[in-house]
Image (cartoon, grey):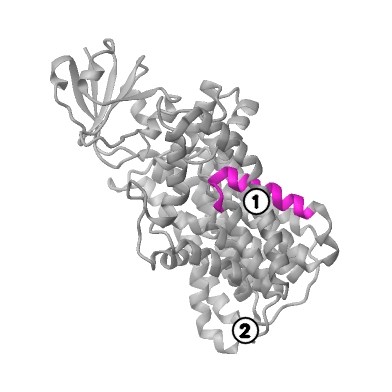
Amino acid sequence: MFYRGNFRIPLASAIILAMCAILLLPWLGETLFNSKGEPREAIVAVSMLESGNWILPLNFGEDFPFKPPFMAWIIAALSWLLNGGVVTEYLSRLPSALAAIGLVMAGFSWARKERGDRFAMLFSIVTLTCFEVFRAAMACRLDMVLTVCMVVPLYLLHDILADPRSRTNPLRWLGAWALLTCAVLTKGPVGALLPGLVAGVYWLLRGQRFFPTLLRMLALALAAMMIPALWYYAAWMQGGDSFLDLMLEENIGRLTGNMSYESHEQPFWYNFVTLIAGCLPWTLLALFALADFRRMQRTPLKPAGLLALTAVVIIVGFYCIPASKRSVYLLPAYPFVCYAITSILDSTAARRSVRAFTWLMACIAIVAPVAFVVMLISPLPSLQLTSPHWYAYITLAAPLAAGLAWMMNRHSPVGHLAVTVWAIYLSYIACFMPAALNGRSDRHLMEKIGKPENILILQPADGQKNRFYTLDFYYRDKLRPVASVDEAEAYPAGTVLLFQTSADTTGLHRNYRYSLLTPRGSDHRSPVGMAVRQ
């Protein structure tokens, strides 16, 4: 593939940083929690601040967190420093957004050394607007924090190998160790072992000797587990064997398929389908470029390209092993897939494909804002759209302007395409997403429930756990589970009892006034009933 000349673009890094900040930071609090994933992470930080226990806080009064606490520590610290100890949607998502910005800027610096400013800017925008990366960047989930802590050490280890003088310089090694330590504190030992495997194979492919490479990577991974080991020990002292069993199941049982419950079990091909879908809209560009494949000049992979190929093959291959598969597990591979997509975008041989794809995105940029306004004026009942804040409508002008600019100018398709896709995402996070999802949040149920002294959750008859994470977050972790209606009898009048259709409601008619709270709860997508103790 043809590589363009390396030339400097004034303020390139500042432009990318501004695009990241404008796209992510103002809009993190616009969308309410509307599924159990985000509040389940945020509740851990809430329980830390409520209980003062920063090692192993219990949510719902009895549940251990499923993952190590690094993400919750950040949320709790930000909430304590910036909002008086109150966790909000914005502060819950802020660590993911900051991690995404760090990931993009680190990728910009890495690609800039190899391919120059133009390629680095395109690579950064493609990474930022890759759908799975963008989705993780605006969500209160640990995956983006984990990704930046896994991917940036690979960039550092690539630079260490490229510059022999830095192999004895402790700063890059120290940076890699610190980030891998945070990765282990985010999701366990895989956070250090998998990047070590990728870097080790890459070093071997670059001609390094086997045993020195093995020792370096193994020492780095083990060193990254030293501080987390202290937390594991302290948590074990608090949680005992129950905590130990949970950690073994999450870290080993998930990999071997020996978990006590079914967890996102998917067939082998699932990872490849989700990778294609997760790279939208840029996978469409790759499909467009198939017509130009014969005209592309194939050249030997540069070191950065070899690292990207190695990372994608090992990370995707590794997550094909366990039966449990989710799209977010592959997130550390996405920057390296985006490197390949950017190589297509930057190729002179793909000019026709890029122009065609730019036309498609320009049409979408013009049609989508108009269609959104029409649907708000004449809504379809099945969509349940809610109107976003007035200032969010300003962002609708961005994709319209970008699409029209291309149709009027039709020069520099690559630049127009990057700006157009960025503008579409800006309108999506500011307008489309809050309008589509806020009506589905259980936050509105608080108006029906009120502020009772006790809110209980009636558990299913089969003994499985049933939790309402969204409501528990908004009630600051005040909900408590009960096994039966008889157990709830110990609570005073005015107590609210929440239950699903799977719960055993025997005896509910005696002392409770009950009704349907919502036909579709946001956590479990099923009806939720409410009973009030008389």
Residue 222: give its label. 1
Is 63 drawn above or below residue 487 in the view shown? Answer: below
Q: Is residue 155 left or right of residue 100?
A: right
Residue 182 lies in the magenta-colored region: yes
Q: Amino acid at mark 1?
A: Leu
Is 373 drawn above or below residue 353 in the view shown? Answer: above
Q: Is residue 352 visible?
A: yes
- Residue depicted at 57% across the width and 28% down the height: 54
- Residue depicted at 71% across the width and 73% down the height: 303
Image location of residue 391, percent across then percent down: 54, 40
Q: Identify residue for label 2.
A: 349
Residue farthest along the top direction in this orientation? 492
Image location of residue 358, percent across then percent down: 55, 71
Q: Is residue 298 left or right of residue 291?
A: right
Specify the segment rendered in magenta: 172-190
Residue farthest along the right direction in this orientation? 165
